[in-house]
Image: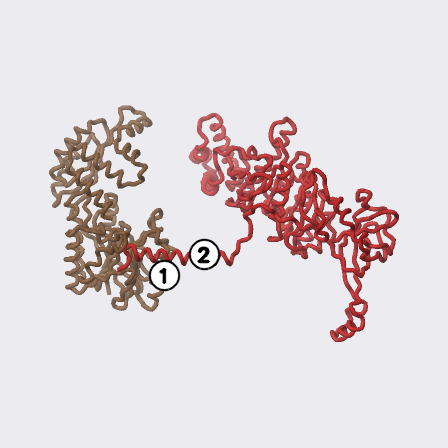
Amino acid sequence: MSKIIGRCVGETSPIEVSFVSKEMPKVGEYVSLVYDEKRVLGMIESLVRGSVSINDDIYDPKIIEKIEEIEGDDHYIKGTIRILGDIDNDLRIPRTPAPPGTEVKVADSNVLKTIFEIEDTGLKLGNLITQEEVEVQVDIDKMVTRHLAILAMTGAGKSNTVAVITDGLLNVNGSILFFDMHSEYVNAEFSNGQVNKINALLNPQYLSFFELARLADISRKAYVQERYFRMAYKETMESLQKGFINSNEFFIDIKKRLSDLLENESYKDDKKRITAVLNKMNYLEDQYSNILDLNAPNLVNKIKINSANVIDLGSVDEVASDIIVSHILKKVLSKRKEFLRTGQGLSFPVFVIIEEAHILAPKNRSTNSKNWISRIAREGRKFGVGLCIVSQSPKSLDPDSLSQANNMIILRLVEPTDQRHVQTASESLSEDLVEQLPSLNIGEAVVLGLMTKIPTLVKIDEFRGKLSGRDLKIVEEWKKSVEEKKKKLETQREEFRELGGDY
Amino acid sequence: MKFTHISDNHLGFRQYGLFERETDFYYVFNMIIEKIIEEKPNFVIHSGDLFEFSRPPTTALLTVQKGFSELKNKNIPIYAIAGNHDIIMRKNAIPPQVLYKKFGMNLISPNNPFFIENEIFIGGLQYASKYHSEFLVEHIKFLENESKKYKKKILVLHQAIDKYLPFDYELELADLPESFNYYAMGHIHQRIVDDYGDGKLVYPGTPEIWRIDELEGYKKNGKGFYIVDMGGDIPEVEKVDLKLPREIIRETVKYSELNDEINRIREYILKLDKKPLMQINIEGGNFDRADVYKVLKKAFYNICLSVRPNYKLESLLDDSNSESEVDELLDPKEIIREKLKAFNNEKISNLAINILNEISEGEFKKVEEIAQKFYEEIYDN
């Protein structure tokens, strides 16, 4: 039988009870209360320690010393328990509150094991922080359909968490699509599946007119420029499809058509604007020649099942990342819809992981990706496109997309605005749990949402494969660089002297 | 306080295997020495590539000995570095400049990195390849440090800087300190006078036409050296132009006007003191090369040192597309270039083309000379 750690006091409610204790329980620890012929599971949400005699009105440490001598460590421990549900009745919240005086016991680890074990569709995230012998699994089906947000400050273990989840999904033949902003996962190695590197190449012919216009920095407000660009673009696309020009001549042709417009007398009032468009075409070619490829295939066709499909955006700027991400998200969603309707298209569900989501879906700016991220957040459930938003700055993240993520893994978060933002986005995160966020250690997380039966504090497993985004050892790198330079210089000096330089 | 700055004489170079061209280079060198003596500078700076090879012909060595002795007699010291042509990357090899230490030459070398002349700091380094660029940069930093206590300072280098030769350089502008008053550069064959840091950066260029593509620069900027006055805050750079002994004529002539043009050019050539080098392009119309060659030979071969004809035929067809195709097919030079592309070496392609030119004109002796020169160049370095 488990240990009694305290008893309920004061007014209790069906969802929350206060208790006092003589033992020292831990925040986040699971407890059970037995009353009204029910076994009820709860979680300790807050704890305070106090002393009746040593109170705030004492201003002399010497007095405290004396009281200590007389009373010993006569402290009390008070806390609150959040009721999670009836253990024997599928964790339903009981209809009756616990009577004051009810014993509070540490929950039995066997009970917890049955709660955190999920058959068939489970993914092991880690172990309970408070009871390490209990493994925590989350429900993959619910995670993918109801989306996931992984939030943490830098260095708290985001990448590790993502890697653990990916490995777990690969174990069940999952298809994961990474937008890898820092080239972290390109060279990763997972134990359960392959990394399928997809080059971030866009074919201007597959881009929509608006995507291309945005890449060329022609804004929606510049409607005259847009009109001329559209004229040239349309004609070029037509002659391309008719085989009058080949794909390598795409830009040459657009530019030629613009130059023709420039010389056309009927457009002479708009010379400046046409020149602007022409300049922007040159800019487009210069700036994005590394991602524009007229022979690039449709990227969605390259997504494989049982693979971590990584789109490397490490060497691409933010505007281009935005275009690439929005383009692919749009295509993924439409190909999934097509498949469900006609049997053609993308034949398997995809879990999309978006790193640095606050850049692609920011709160105060409108980006192309933002529209598609929130669209997938809303519709993806029905079409088997899951979304995983990863961010270290929840406060600058688009709240719409964040609130659509019904599952959350929150690692250490210190910034108060970040915490509040997360709390407003998630109904199941109580203020007391929010208070826990700064005190989490690296790799420890609050896990909430439909993918787990009850909110829980988890120590996330350490990813066993290879990940290249580890922090560099800066001091060592500097030292190495200095030493290498010195050595190189020494060799060069020696060689220079030996080979005809000694006179 | 003034000095002269010269560079890139390439003495011992026998252009097109012509003995006369070797002599031309000596002639120009002697002319420079004469002019220097006229100008009476306090000293002379030479920025490398005095010789074409690290083992120059004896005549080249003697020419320099004579010239430098004259300067020594007039108490004009010389400060010099070795250029890439003077150096051979081999154990215990030293550049030929060392021979003139007794003739008033102060050789700036890795072991003697700088000299002080009349309170002017003169420091530098021989040519360093890209492979040794870190050493080069460090050495320049060292010179910058050493020069701190002097008011006037000159840096002597034989390097290409990225600003002027963006695809084939050893030194980046960023690695060149700004504290020197005069950057006495060598290596680039065009004349360059630029502002840099607290003073001037100067490439005097070659005083003779070392490669035919320098002709354009010669016509525009002349060739020669510089006289620099270090008296003021900023050095004053004065250009000295030389009249080259031999003309190089480059003409493009339409086939239809061939006879008139030949007469015009002949008249011009007959007025010259020395036989010129001539490169003549015949283009337009359809003609038999052998016939044109005969005409050219009769008109020019006695009055020119060397004639290099180039033919560009117009196709019978009007269609411009097929014209270029026919041209390509008919041009043996392009075919040779294409075939030798694998060597990725301009010199080898040129060798083959030059040999073809001479053989097709029956000049077997010249072929021998060309081949010999080619291998001399390889083995001498």
Looking at the figure, which quarter contains the C terminus of chain A?
bottom left
Mark 2, residue position: A481
Q: How is the image coloured?
A: by chain
The picture places residue B186, in percent across and down from the top left corner, at: 27, 54
* Closer to us: B272 or A346: A346
Q: Nearer the viewer, mark 2 or mark 1?
A: 2
Residue placed furthest toward the top: B317
Dot 1: element: helix
The picture places residue A146, in percent across and down from the top left corner, at: 69, 40
* Closer to us: B366 or B172: B366
**What chain is tagged by disc 2?**
A
The picture places residue B68, in percent across and down from the top left corner, at: 17, 59
A18 sits left or right of A309 in the view:
right
Q: Amino acid at mark 2?
A: Ser
Indicate the quadrant where residue B73 lies. bottom left
Q: Amino acid at mark 1?
A: Lys
Q: Which chain is red?
A: A
Mark 1 surroundings within 10 Å by alpha-carbon count, few (fewer than 14), some (14 through 19), many (20 or more)? some
The picture places residue A58, in percent across and down from the top left corner, at: 77, 72
Give the Cα distance between marks 2 and 1: 19 Å
Which of the numbered marks, if any, corresponds to residue B141?
1
Classify B275 as above or below A301.
below
Q: Which chain is brown?
A: B
